Image (cartoon, helix red, strand yellow):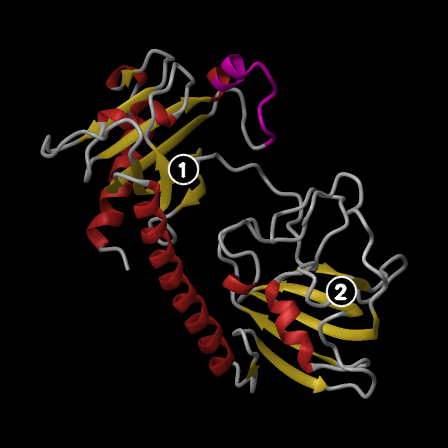
Amino acid sequence: MKSISSYLWVSMVLLAAISCTNTDFKKTKSGLLYKIYSDGKGPTIKKGEFIKGEIIVKVRDSVLSNTYDGFPFYNRADSVGPIYNPNEIFLMLRKGDRAVVVLLADSIQRKGGGQLPPFLKKKDKITITFKITDVFASQDLLMADRASELEKEKDKEVKNVEAYLAKNNIQAQKSAQGAYYVVEDPGNGPKVDSGKQVSVRYTGKLFPSGKVFQSNMTGPGNTPFKFVVGAHQIIPGWDDALRNFHQGGKGTLYIPAFLAYNDQKGPGGQQFENLIFDIVVDTVRDAPPTPAQPPMGMGGNPMQRMPMRPGMPGRPGQPMPQQPQPQH
């Protein structure tokens, strides 16, 4: 948990950045506006090193991204040209430094040579406030640290799901990999298992609000979702928990984010989203022969939790169209 002083500092810096004029900032060669808050101790980040940090991205009164209460960001510090990107100042920073970067929407449009994303207006400013919390000499060290952070995130997700179940007096069982499920009716047909082709009707809900983001339960054109169990065509929580049902089965799945979209953006547009699914298993059959080649344009293994394009056939809970998010 972050300290209150960290949140207070970020709030003060954001307020100062928004209220300051452009002349209060320095400029990079590309025209990027920035301020650095540093005690001047320790070496500056070297080209090729990797950084870990906390970041808040804000446009007007809307926070687009905030890792101060979530997962840290990682990036490589490299020598870059005038590209109008926060990466430009990384080699000026030290471990422990804080910085504010302001990108002007009209400059993004002019330098990018294209249209602005829908959530930006021409006179907008994107204010990015961040702190460098660690520096790694190699990618292996970064990956080890990231793995540790993911384990912490996983523990938090599980605690949140279990707290929700306890608060709402839901008597759920835990699957082999760690998803939670409630069997309303186990069904009496063939069992869901590896190699079986299963068709499922479902209603996907955000956690913990219960807001529906997707459903094929009823209505014209809402056909059951069909997939092969164990073929990596669905999020892991489905592949795991549905094995506790038979054809005709009905129930609810409570899936921690590490068994859903993990650090990719989920249906609610955020990383690390726990999800809820009401499901009905329509059919369980032997899977048809595997095609020699994947469908055109789908790649070799397209269902590895990678977000799919809106309108493209996908998994239950695939991200719906959402506002673009700044890259960090």
Give the amino acid at mark 1: Val
Q: Is residue 82 left or right of residue 203?
A: left
How far across and down, in percent of the image, does residue 115 sit?
Answer: 61, 20
Closer to us: 16 or 137: 137
| Quadrant of the image occupied by residue 135 | top left
Queried whether the magenta region covers residue 117, the answer comes back as yes
Q: Which residue is mark 1?
A: 57
Asked where in the image residue 246 lies, by quadrant, the reply is bottom right
Pick whichever, 144 or 247, lies toward us: 144
Depth order, front residue of 300/44: 300
Vertical placement of residue 247 versus 301, above or below: below
User: Magenta stretch: residue 134 in it?
Assistant: no
Mark number displayed over residue 155: none
Up/down of 8 relative to 94, above or below: below
Return the x and y of residue 172 as percentages of the image width and height: 57, 84
Residue at screen point 34% across, 22% down: 88
79 relative position to 303: left or right = left
